[in-house]
Image (cartoon, rainbow, N blue to C red):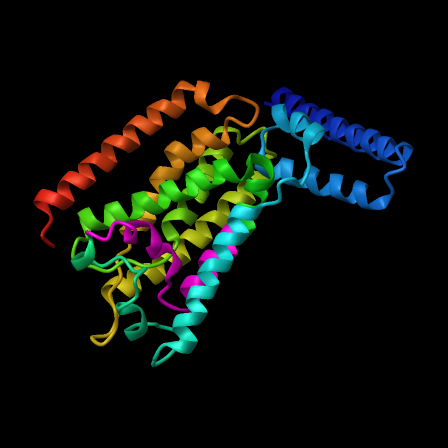
């Protein structure tokens, strides 16, 4: 046991020495190139992001080609759109209070409504509408804190794919398992990002720095528990005058993230379309979508 502990400590020290050497070499290169302090600070940001988002074996590849072009446009744009829609319904539509929006969003063309399932855009646009201040703040904080670093590493196309896969999976799951309830919020997309990142941390736990790995898992768990608590309250304990909202999107978004999201986020230095895991995940997702469409057309209690 003592020998094993000593070997583990030696491995940790070697990793720390390697990181320190890498940082010193990069700092020397930046100063020799005359880049000044700003490029060096940018490199430090990328180094921190790589430690949080990538296993050790691909960090150097990321750092060699890291840049902010294109910037994380997808996550920022989605967040601005969600905030703008929330402010619109909170300020310019009649509301009893901001904490629990109800009457103003019932007639929204964005909300998922069981009676208007033929308007297919609602299976995606519901992500723009939120049930209250806590709801939108929780989603915005999480998707910005996690989504921006993910988009810096994996770029907007891949992050957008995972996010929208979670959004669509969420609305379809709600239409199956809670077919008579309304659905609002971006939790399906947020949980897809968390699910993909969560699986990546679990699979590469030792490489992504164990101490930080534990902290990251705990943070994700705390956020999930608090958000699920609010979702359950909105679903089962809302007042008679309120708007019961489905919570099935949380689970479906998480599963979409743990399948498609994990595959996408674990293929940083690989061609995604050449990875058989990606096509297996897409096939399973397609079967789920086809079943949900069949259910909504022929079997749904909301028909």
In-image side of 299 versus 208 (left or right): left
Name the spot of residue 88 as percent of width and height, x first.
42, 71
Which secondary structure type mostly characterizes the magenta part of the structure?
A: helix
Q: Where is residue 69, by image quadrant?
A: top right
Q: Which quadrant: the N terminus? A: top right
Name the spot of residue 216 as percent of width and height, x first.
54, 44
In the image, residue 182 above or below residue 239: above
Between residues 303 and 258, which one lies in front from this camera angle?
Answer: 303
Q: Residue 136 in magenta?
A: yes
Residue depicted at 64% across the width and 20% down the height = 3
Residue depicted at 65% across the width and 30% down the height = 62
Name the spot of residue 165 as percent of width and height, x first.
37, 40
In-image side of 181 versus 134 (left or right): left
Q: Where is residue 29, by image quadrant?
A: top right
Q: How many marks?
A: 0
Name the spot of residue 168 as percent of width and height, x first.
32, 44
For the record, the magenta segment spans: 118-143
Residue depicted at 54% across the width and 41% down the height = 214
Q: Is residue 195 visible?
A: no
Between residues 257 and 55, which one lies in front from this camera angle?
Answer: 257
Q: Residue 14 in magenta?
A: no
Q: Is residue 104 visible?
A: yes
In-image side of 57 versus 195 (left or right): right
Residue depicted at 28% across the width and 29% down the height = 284
């Amino acid at each position: 046991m003592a020998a094993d502990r000593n070997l583990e400590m030696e491995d940790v020290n070697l990793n720390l020495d390697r990181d320190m050497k890498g940082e010193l070499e990069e700092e020397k290169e930046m100063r020799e190139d005359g880049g000044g302090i700003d490029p060096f600070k940018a490199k430090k940001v990328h180094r921190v992001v790589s430690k949080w988002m990538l296993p050790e074996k691909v960090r150097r590849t990321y750092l060699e080609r890291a840049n902010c072009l294109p910037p994380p446009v997808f996550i920022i744009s989605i967040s601005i759109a969600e905030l703008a829609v929330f402010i619109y319904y909170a300020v310019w539509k009649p509301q009893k209070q901001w904490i629990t929006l109800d009457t103003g969003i019932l007639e929204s063309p964005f909300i998922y409504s069981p009676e208007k399932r033929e308007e297919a855009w609602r299976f995606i646009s519901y992500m723009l509408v939120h049930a209250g201040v806590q709801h939108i703040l929780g989603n915005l904080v999480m998707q910005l804190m996690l989504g921006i670093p993910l988009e810096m590493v994996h770029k907007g196309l891949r992050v957008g794919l995972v996010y929208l896969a979670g959004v669509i999976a969420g609305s379809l799951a709600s239409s199956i398992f809670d077919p008579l309830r309304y659905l609002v919020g971006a939790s399906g997309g947020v949980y897809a990002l968390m699910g993909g990142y969560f699986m990546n941390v679990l699979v590469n736990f030792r490489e992504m720095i164990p101490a930080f790995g534990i902290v990251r898992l705990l943070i994700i768990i705390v956020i999930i528990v608090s958000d699920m608590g609010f979702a359950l309250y909105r679903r089962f304990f809302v007042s008679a005058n309120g708007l019961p909202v489905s919570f099935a999107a949380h689970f479906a978004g998480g599963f979409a993230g743990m399948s498609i999201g994990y595959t996408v986020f674990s293929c940083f230095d690989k061609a995604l379309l050449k990875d058989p895991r990606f096509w297996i995940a897409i096939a399973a997702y397609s079967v789920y979508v086809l079943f949900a469409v069949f259910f909504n057309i022929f079997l749904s209690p909301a028909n």
